Amino acid sequence: MCNGTVKYVSNIEKSEIEIIKGCKTFNREAQKSLYKLYYGKMNAISFRYTGSYDDAKDIVHDSFVIVFEKIAGYTGSGSLEGWIRKIVVNKSIDFLNKKNKLYVKVSEQEQQILNDHNSNSEYSNNKEGDELDSIYSSGLTKEEIMDAIDLLKDNYRVVFNLSVIDGYSHKNIAETLNITEELSRIRLKRARVALQAILLEAAKAKKINKITNQTHAKSIE
């Protein structure tokens, strides 16, 4: 009998460990297995940033090239999915930056807020809980919420995705997008306000549609 806690390793974890070992020796079958395992999730992540299925497909392909090149340095600290996810997000941001520099450019309205000390403090100290609660209590499905996020302006959508969905800090966002932390906070706040308006309209439309369908059903009974 051995002392200490015995860690249970599931078949899924065993399979992933074997895949990683195979990829570190550039085994083609292991690489195919890893690609198949995470392609769907990574494609959805890239699409959230690019809004294009074709671009997302190319980005994910290029991301896995990097994964296979660098996986020898993967130590196992943190999840493999999280490690791959970070590569895909960074590749997606690189793609957008090369395509359009709007993430760096500061609009006149944003510059006014940055110059106004009181407004800047308000954005810096904003509490995020209420906005999140309203998002998830809107009565819409996850797919409908994601569709609403896609309607945000590109520079707002990117910051929202990085902060709320992918868990980046404002410091990380600033470094990733080459903007200031203050601008990151402003764009997140404005993204939340815009998203609330979109969700409110979507929820109203859904409610009206439901009532209309119920009324129509009763009329033909």
Image (tube, rainbow, N blue to C red):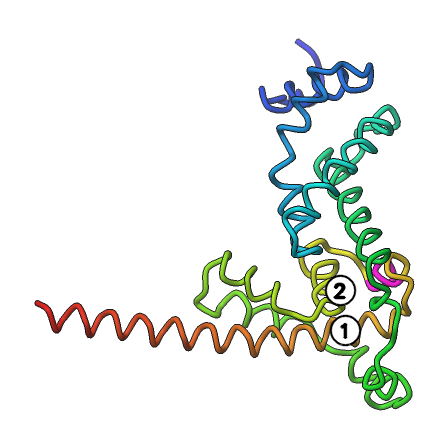
For label 2, the SS is helix
The residue segment tinted magenta is 170-174
Mark 1 Cα shell of 10 Å, populated few (<14), some (14-19), many (≥20): many
Mark 2: which amino acid? Val
For label 1, the SS is helix
Query: Which quarter of the picture shows residue 87?
Result: top right
Count the numbered circles shown. Answer: 2
The C terminus appears in which quarter of the rendering? bottom left
Residue furthest out toward the left: 221
- Residue 159 is marked as 2
Disc 1, disc 2: CB below 8 Å?
A: yes
Task: Give the answer, above or below, for where 43 lies relative to 194.
Answer: above
In-image side of 20 versus 174 (left or right)? left
The N terminus appears in which quarter of the rendering? top right
Q: Could you tell me which residue is drawn at 64 percent across and 70 percent down?
A: 129
Residue furthest out toward the top: 1
Task: Give the answer, above or below, for where 79 lies relative to 104.
Answer: above
Query: Which quarter of the picture shows residue 22?
Result: top right
Q: Is residue 221 magenta?
A: no
Mark 1: which amino acid? Arg
Residue at image mark 1: 187
The percent position of residue 163, horizontal first and vertical second, equals 74, 61
Q: Could you tell me which residue is drawn at 69 percent across and 73 percent down?
A: 191
